[in-house]
Amino acid sequence: MPENKQRYFFSFFTEVANAGPTGAAEIYLDEFDKNNNRLGGEWLGGFYEGTFGMPGYLYQPSSQQVDQVMIDIYSLPGANITFFGSNFYFGVINNRKRLAPIINLLLGD
């Protein structure tokens, strides 16, 4: 990653249509070096039944060796969750003053 001393912002629009008793989806980020060797990872957060909105997650590479990342969105065992996502964004935060406020999810009920 060209700016691996920088902080990055990951966001997307999501709606959780339905979920089972343990209904949740988790977001995990894997880090890789320039030879595609996995270096480690970081749990970014999750979203749950009734979620509607744009979650925002901050990330900073763990070392100078990080060349690329992979973001995984997965459900927990038995979650039986249906969710939709669009408008995915991942980019460097160049100026914190110009970063739009991070909108936390609206949890329904």
Image (cartoon, rainbow, N blue to C red):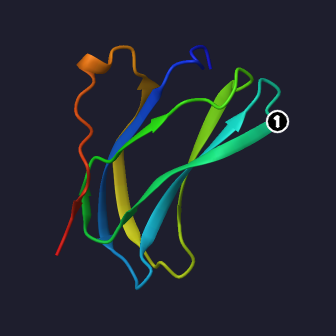
Q: Which residue is mark 1?
A: 37
Quarter assignment of residue 37: top right
Q: Residues within 10 Å of mark 1 (few under 14, many from 20)?
A: few
Q: Secondary structure at mark 1?
A: loop
How many discs appear? 1
Residue furthest left as drawn: 109
In the image, what residue occupies the spot 27% across and 39% down? 102
At a point 46% along the width and 79% down the height, the residue shown is 80
| Residue 20 against residue 7 in the figure, above or below | below
Which corner quadrant holds the N terminus?
top right
Report x, y in % for residue 45: 46, 54
Image side of residue 73 versus residue 84, left or right? right
Q: Residue at x 79, y 32 (%)?
A: 36
Q: Is residue 35 above or below residue 55?
A: above
The reply, left or right, for residue 5 in relation to residue 23 is right
- Quadrant of the snapshot with the C terminus: bottom left
User: Where is residue 89 drawn, in percent x and y?
Assistant: 39, 33
Instruction: Name the residue at the bottom extreme.
Output: 21
Q: Position of residue 101 (x, y in %)?
A: 22, 34
Quadrant assignment, res 106? bottom left
Q: Which amino acid lies under the numbered mark 1 shown in the image of this protein?
A: Asn
Give percent across and percent down for residue 44.
50, 48
The answer to whether residue 73 is left or right of residue 107 is right
